[in-house]
Each structure stands twice: as C-alpha cells, then as structure tokens.
C-alpha cells in the first residue's frame, strides 16, 4: 500500500516539531525537590505529537489515497506571505505610515485590482485611515521606524 | 431573578444597547460574507475591546457570535454559498426556495427559527447555569483534569475527516501553550532564548493568524468569483408569493422545537458546535417529516430545522466555559481571552465574584437575539444585496492590513505581528491538509488549566497518576473520552464524515 502524500508532509512536520519539543523539554529545569514538575506536561504533549505523526506515516488504503487532494501550493498565498513578512520588516524600518502606503496597492494588485487611480488612492487613504482608527481613536503608541518615520516630520 | 436585574441594567444603559445593536449588524454582515466567519471577525475585533468596559466588550463579541451564526443563512439562501459552515444545511432547501422566487419567505423562516432556537438555548443556559456552577464547585483537580483530557479527546476526534489529524491539532495546541515561563516554578520552557516568548504565545495574535490571515491566504488562492445573488421578481404576484402565512409556518414549529433541543444538548458538549447540530437536526427533521420527499427541493421545514439548531448552540456552549473555564467553541475560546484581559477569572467562582456581570451578559444576549431577529426579518434581503456589492478583491486586502494592525495593538509589539503571520501560515496549512484549526485553538486555551489541574492532582496524591482512576467522577470522564474516541474511529471506518468546525 502506498504512502498517502497528503499525510506525509504534515506527518514529517509533526514529527520534527515533536522531536524539537521533546529535546527542549529536557532543558527545562527540575523542580526544587528534584521532581519533573515543569517538564511533565511539555514532555507528554510532545510525545503525543510524535506518536500521532508516526501513525500518520502508516501506509494507507488506495481509496484514502484517492480521496486526498494533491493540488500544488498556489503562488498567490506565497506572494501574499512574502508581502506581509516584508510589511512587518518595513514597519520596523520606515514606520507604519509609509510602509502601509507602499504595501496596500501591492496587496490590492495581488487580489486582482489593476486600476492605477484606485491603487494610488488606496495608497494614500489606507495609512491615514488606520492611523485615525488605531493610533488616534484608540490611543495606541504607533510602531516606530528605525531608519525614518514620517510621524517625526508631521508630528503625529 | 438575577436575569431581570440584568435586563433592567442593560435596558437602562444606552451605550451597552448601542454596542449590542452594532454587534447584531456586524455579526449578520460578517456571517453572510462567504469565507468570513464570526470567529474571524471576533478575533480581529478583540483588540478594539481592550478600550471598552468589560460588559460592553463581552456583550459586543458575544452578540456578534450569535448574529454571525444567523447571518450565514442569508448567504446560504441568496448566494447558494453558506456564509458559515453551520449554514450549509440551510442551503439544501434555502437555495431551491430562492430559485422558486421565495427567497424572502425562506429568510423569514430562517430568521424566526434562529430567534426561537437561540432564545431557547439562552433560556436553558440562564436557568441551568447556576446549578452547573454549584456542581462544578464540588470538583477537585483530578476531576477537572479528567474533564480537560476528555475535552481534548472529544474536540480533537469528533469533528473532521481524520481522527489522527484532529488529535494532532489538539496536541500541537498544547505544545504551543507550553511556551513561556512555567506558571508554578517560573522555569523557562520552549523559549529558545527569545525574551518576547517569556510571557508565552499571546492568544490574540495567534487567533488572528489562524482565523483571519489564514482565510486571506485561502481567498487569494481562490481569487473567488464575485458573489451572485438570486434576484427576486418585484411584482405584486411575487410579493404575495413571498408572504409567509401561518398555514405555511405551522408545520415548521415542531421542527423548530425539536431542533432547538438538539442544538441545546449539542451546544453543552465541548467542541461539537453548530455545524454538527445543524446537520443532526436536518437529518432528524427529514426522518420525522410528513413530506420527506420535498426536503432538499425547497421545503420551508428544511430551512427551519437547521437554523433553529445552529443558533440554539450559542447559549449552552457558554455553560462549560463559564462554569469550568472550558470553551466549547472557537468563539468561547476567544471570549476566555477577553475575560482574562478584563481581569475576570472564569470558572465556578465567577458566579460569586461577577454574578451581576454574567447575568447582564445573558441579558445582552437576549436583547441581541431580538435585535438581529428584527433586523433580519425586515432587512435580510437588503443585507444580502449590500454584501453582493462588496468587492471581495478589496475586502480581503483591507482585512489583511487590519489583521496586522490588530495583532500589533494587542500588546503594542511588532513581535506579535510576527506571531500572527506565523500562525497565519500554520492555519492555512491546517486548512489545506484537513487538520482542525478550531481544535488547535481550543486546546491552546485549555492547556494551561489542564496542566495546573494535573500537577495539583499529583501533589494531592500518594498514588501518582492512579488518582485519576480512583476518583469516580474522574474515572467516569476518562471512560467517556475513551468511548467517544472508539466510537468515532468505528463510525469513520463505517462511513467517512466530512464536517468542519469552522464556526463551532
């Protein structure tokens, strides 16, 4: 019987996570009386993860294999993931106003918006709308840009 | 008696009423947008509630959950796409009715059924919860741990295509919860030297990632077609045909009452949720119907049964949460965080320390049901038309940007945004590989209490882990867990079940 490809990838991920967690569990200091106290629960849960990951690697019946989807990973989510990671990095460097202005049109483009005027309007309105809601109305201290922050200039 | 005081408090406070009203509308709209669930909306809105009074915050989120469950029926009937997993059963008869030009009639039946089911569940909760809380006070740590363990097994194994993947989702949630300082000894666990992890993985960014960002990834993958609404003819004959008469509604009543009971019972069990309730009620209704041949082709009873059941789940699902601290649904799991943020300790003592708040929350629930009922009865078609005009290619980028801001606002930390992104990937992967994100989140929330109960039990015991089988209540719950697991494995071998817990 073949391995179910739909299960193999996640099973390996579970095994790896479990193995890291089991190893890290042994770094947890013992209690003052020498008992395993703080270690027990992490160790058991990581062990269960390894057990379940191992069971998922078992060969499966052909009908289970047929049921599983083998569609590849689409490009859209990966591009969006790259964008959101870049957005996080950019906020730390340029503050959220400029980064939101840069990222908003790209996000809209990824979702199929192609109107240049619409993208330009979104690039201008989105940062200020979020600024008003989150940082003016709620009074949260905005993330500071390490390289440059527009708020330093406009005194927000 | 407490509920009348709660009702009076809420009705005399226009600010709370305004929040409940806003929640009724927000929930209905969010529930009706295919792909967006009430859980996602609540996760995204939690940071906003930090700045609200505890009752307003809890009522706002609680009523969004109720109204969101109902809102799913609008999409199911008008767009042939269930707004939430729980409304998929409504679609079976709701959409055929819309195709016959009777969408308004179907939505009126869905509204009345949802309101009756929701009120039934809420009243059972109000009447019964004090007793459950009193019983919960008698439970010791070993009993509590057995209940937690059973909840992990039930939540992980009962729903979804695969028991293994469900249980793995639950186990992963527990492992992630172990990150941070040990609550008893203060020992460093799974932090790998990262200072920001000392406080553990924060619940809010985790939930925003799992429920919101993961859905944005899913939507960009689908780049779904624009929503198409069924257009009703607008002449006098069509209006007459859409008028719901007592003769038409009367056969629905027994189904509504039976389904309300089904939803209430299922709601009390952690993890099962409204999707299961709706399908069980639909199946049971069809089995007992006088016109089973009409079900699936546009029977009003086929709309009434699942709608009453999926909304009846809402109130009772709060019972394990408020009395034991065990959330029965994803919305419950989010509410745990909101209670903690406002310094309210959930569990049996909640009815001693915050009795007025809890009954006021129930009162908000009752008022919220009436509000979404009225808005839905007279305005569901307008909500449907409004949603059909919302371009999803603009909506989801806005949601992505909002989720980044919401994750940041929760603790004013960009690290939390990184956590949100990480769990967005995890959540999306879970969806693609048929894991159970809801089991992951609920287990994450439960794990802290479970560990505390486990370690307290071992300290109480001279017999080590045997304490869990020498106490009758603990043993009973452990046996329930084993029974549920075995019966689930058996039922899967006999008949694959394809259900989801998207909005349990």
Image (cartoon, rainbow, N blue to C red):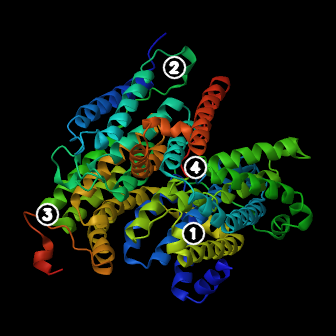
For residue B102, above or below residue B423: below
Residue placed under numbered mark 2 in the picture: A65
Label 1 residue SS: helix
Q: Chain of mark 2?
A: A
Side (left or right) of B182 relative to B361: left
Mark 3, Cα crowd under 10 Å, few <14 / some 14-19 / many 20+, is many
Distance from the alpha carbon under mark 2 to that under mark 4? 31 Å
- Residue A156 percent location from the top left of the image: 18, 80
Q: Are marks 1 and 3 in contact (CB under 8 Å)?
A: no
Callouts 1 and 2 on one subunit: no
Distance from the alpha carbon under mark 1 to that under mark 3? 39 Å
Q: Are marks 1 and 2 in contact (CB under 8 Å)?
A: no
Which circle, 2 or 3, is nearer the viewer?
Answer: 2
Mark 1, Cα crowd under 10 Å, few <14 / some 14-19 / many 20+, is many
- Residue B80 percent location from the top left of the image: 65, 50
Q: Chain of mark 3?
A: A
Which circle, 2 or 4, is nearer the viewer?
Answer: 4
- Which numbered dot is residue B270? 4
State the residue in front, B65 or B442: B442
- Residue B340 percent location from the top left of the image: 40, 65
- Which numbered dot is residue A94? 3
Q: Residue at x 35, y 63 (%)?
A: B402
Distance from the alpha carbon under mark 2 to that under mark 3? 49 Å
């Amino acid at each position: 019987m073949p391995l179910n490809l739909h299960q193999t990838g996640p099973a390996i991920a579970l095994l790896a996570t479990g193995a890291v967690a089991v190893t890290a569990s042994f770094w947890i200091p013992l209690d003052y009386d020498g008992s395993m106290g703080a270690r027990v629960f992490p160790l058991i849960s990581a062990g269960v993860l390894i057990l379940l990951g191992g069971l998922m690697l078992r060969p499966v019946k052909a009908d289970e294999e047929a049921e599983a989807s083998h569609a590849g990973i689409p490009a859209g989510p990966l591009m969006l993931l790259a964008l959101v990671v870049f957005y996080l990095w950019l906020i730390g460097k340029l503050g959220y106003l400029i980064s939101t202005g840069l990222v908003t049109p790209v996000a809209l483009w990824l979702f199929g918006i192609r109107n240049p005027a619409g993208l330009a309007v979104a690039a201008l309105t989105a940062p200020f709308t979020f600024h008003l809601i989150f940082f003016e109305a709620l009074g949260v201290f905005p993330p500071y840009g390490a390289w440059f922050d527009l708020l330093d200039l406009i005194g927000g | 008696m407490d509920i009348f005081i709660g009702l009076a408090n809420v009705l005399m406070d226009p600010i709370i009423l305004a929040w409940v009203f806003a929640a009724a509308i927000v929930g209905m709209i969010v529930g009706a947008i295919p792909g967006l669930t009430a859980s996602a909306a609540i996760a995204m809105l939690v940071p906003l509630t930090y700045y609200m009074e505890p009752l307003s915050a809890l009522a706002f989120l609680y009523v969004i959950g109720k109204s969101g469950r109902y809102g799913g029926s609008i999409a199911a009937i008008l767009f042939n796409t269930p707004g939430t997993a729980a409304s998929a059963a409504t679609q079976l008869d709701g959409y055929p009715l819309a195709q016959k030009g009777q969408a308004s009639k179907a939505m009126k039946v869905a509204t009345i059924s949802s309101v009756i089911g929701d009120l039934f569940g809420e009243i059972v909760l109000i009447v019964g919860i004090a007793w459950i809380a009193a019983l919960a006070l008698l439970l010791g740590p070993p009993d509590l741990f057995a209940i937690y363990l059973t909840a992990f097994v039930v939540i992980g194994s009962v729903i979804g295509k695969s028991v293994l993947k469900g249980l793995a989702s639950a186990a992963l949630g527990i492992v992630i919860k172990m990150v941070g300082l040990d609550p008893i000894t203060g020992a460093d666990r799974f932090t790998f030297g990262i200072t920001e992890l000392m406080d553990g993985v924060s619940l809010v960014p985790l939930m925003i990632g799992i429920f919101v960002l993961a859905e944005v990834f899913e939507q960009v993958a689908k780049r779904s077609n624009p929503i198409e609404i069924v257009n009703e003819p607008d002449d006098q004959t069509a209006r007459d045909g859409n008028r719901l008469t007592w003769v038409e509604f009367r056969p629905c009543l027994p189904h509504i009452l039976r389904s309300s009971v089904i939803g209430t019972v299922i709601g009390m069990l952690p993890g099962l949720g409204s999707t299961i309730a709706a399908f069980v009620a639909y199946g049971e209704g069809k089995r007992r119907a006088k016109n089973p041949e009409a079900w699936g082709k546009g029977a009003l009873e086929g709309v009434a049964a699942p709608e009453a059941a999926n909304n009846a789940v809402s109130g009772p699902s709060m019972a394990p949460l408020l009395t034991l601290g065990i959330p029965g649904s994803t919305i419950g799991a989010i509410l745990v965080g909101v209670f903690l943020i406002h310094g309210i300790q959930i569990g049996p003592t909640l009815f001693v320390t915050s009795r007025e708040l809890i009954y006021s929350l129930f009162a908000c629930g009752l008022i919220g049901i009436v509000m979404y009922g009225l808005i839905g009865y007279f305005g569901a078609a307008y909500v449907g038309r409004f949603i059909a005009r919302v371009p999803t290619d603009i909506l989801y980028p806005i949601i992505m940007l909002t989720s980044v801001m919401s994750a940041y606002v929760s603790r004013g930390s960009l690290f939390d945004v990184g956590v949100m992104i990480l769990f967005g990937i995890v959540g999306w992967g879970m969806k693609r590989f048929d894991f159970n994100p809801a089991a992951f989140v609920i287990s994450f929330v439960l794990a802290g209490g479970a560990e505390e109960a486990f370690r307290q039990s071992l300290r109480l015991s001279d017999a080590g882990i045997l304490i869990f089988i020498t106490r009758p209540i603990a043993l009973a719950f452990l046996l329930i867990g084993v029974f549920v697991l075995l019966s689930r494995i058996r039922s899967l071998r006999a008949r694959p079940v394809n259900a989801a817990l998207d909005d349990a």
